[in-house]
Image (cartoon, rainbow, N blue to C red):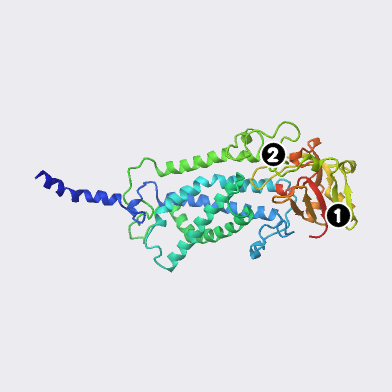
Amino acid sequence: MPERRRIASLPDRLPDRLTALRTPADPGFWRSPVRGVRFTAVLGLVLLVGLTLLFVTGLLSYAAYNPDLDPVNDKTPDKGLLGLYLFAWPTGPHWLYRLTQGLHVTVGIVLVPVLLAKLWSVIPRLFALPPARSVGHALERISLLLLVGGALFEFLTGLLNIQLDYLFPGSFYTLHFYGAWVFLAGFVAHVALKLPQAVRVLRSGIPRGEPDTPAAPDPLAAPDPLPATLSRRGALAMVGAGSLLLLITSAGRSFDGPLRRIALLTPRGGTEEGPGPNAFQVNKTAAAVRITPADTGERWRLTVRGPAGELRFSRAELLAMEQHSAALPIACVEGWSTSDQLWRGVRLSDLAALAGYPDSPPDVFVESLQRSGSFRKAALRDNQVRDGRSLLALEVNGAPLSPDHGYPARIIVPAAPGVLNTKWVETLTFGEL
């Protein structure tokens, strides 16, 4: 009899075992009491604002490189119609790129917890069967594939670029640019489909049927939730706290003072590069690109080309020319920037006049002593050459440039990305590009 009772009790235990064997396609597999359409809608609206800002500032960053000026500036030569919006990047205000790229990178970092929480909140829907109930539903699922895949790709490549970890195959500029347009296609389709519903949910709660019908069940809520240990408001507060922590430990990349010292999640945190007038951030050191004292010593000459022929100047001869000063920051694509530094040197427009363009300075093609790596050659537009603050800088903050800041001479242009402020300049060729 005892043996019979044990055998008879097996069917009573089978439902528990079957529950344990549920798959992600089974709604009962997901049991968090936090999931719900209102929770997801709040996260979605935050991402709507944040991702729109990311896309706009990303396009501005691309325009700042003047990619249609010269092939060396264009890292996306097959962009076609995707480059129709491009315009001549201005030189004012002088902090423009510092603002737009600082926002791009900082907002991207801050949105990471929001993005992860949003994906977690809707993950049961990704496993729903059948995968497509209609043509419209199939199109929605395809847009989700573009949206989720594009978002993860953009955030991953962006975060790796911030840390200077180029683990991805190919150029970051190319991959990030085309990835952004793939993401945008999914983003626009998803917003068009879901924004009206999200607004209704935030205004009135769970979507309802006809006036005389009861409220529809929450499609994202677990049908068999576990006991609650955290409210949905508490979960949103945790996501917000995570974003705030990332803001505090990354925003300092764009400021001086205490915030810069606690920018722990970026390679721009910690102490500055030594004391003195040259004690501000650099991206590439002279040693990293194999610039030696022999390259920058007494034998160095600046070559200037134009209709007047080929002219060569020593550093002493450049210092003997009329010197001008400009207070400008350095701002890089990784999102870090310096405060305004006081640069002193020869105006690019004056060098253009020596090259044979006394009245209307044209574009200029800049070549560095650096023999390898990206942007060892770069082009600047005529409006950048004409600006009186655009210099071939020889000094900074009252002292000669250090080797890491481009000695014997470097370009400094207002509002330009850091990579266009070429260091260790060897040749300037003036003319239409």
Residue 198 on image: x %, y %: 46, 55
At horizontal 85% and vertical 46% (from top left) the residue drawn is 301
Residue 273 on image: x %, y %: 69, 35
The picture quadrant where one finds residue 260 is top right
Residue 316 on image: x %, y %: 88, 41
Q: In this view, does 255 lie to the left or right of 401?
A: left
Structural crowding at the residue carrying mark 1, measured as other residues with C-alpha within 10 Å and reported as few (<14), some (14–19) or many (≥20)? many
Q: What element carries label 1?
A: strand
- Which of 324/18 is in front? 18
Q: In this view, does 28 lie to the left or right of 374?
A: left
> Which label sits in the foreground, 1 or 2?
1
Residue 273, visible in the rendered structure: yes
At horizontal 55% and vertical 61% (from top left) the residue drawn is 185
Q: In this view, does 186 lie to the left or right of 306?
A: left
Cα separation, mark 1 vs mark 2, equals: 31 Å
Question: In the rendered image, which residue does mark 1 sit on?
Answer: 305
Q: In this view, does 148 lie to the left or right of 290?
A: left
Query: Mark 2 is on which residue type?
Result: Gln
Query: Mark 1 is on which residue type?
Result: Arg
Residue sticking out furthest to the top: 275
- Split into 4 quadrants, where in the image is the C terminus? bottom right
Question: In the rendered image, which residue does mark 2 sit on?
Answer: 281
Q: Is mark 2 on a helix, strand or loop?
A: loop
Residue sticking out furthest to the left: 1
The picture quadrant where one finds residue 296 is top right
- Split into 4 quadrants, where in the image is the N terminus? top left
Residue 82, compared with residue 419, is above or below; it is: below
Residue 282, compared with residue 387, is above or below; it is: above
- Which of 226/22 is in front? 22
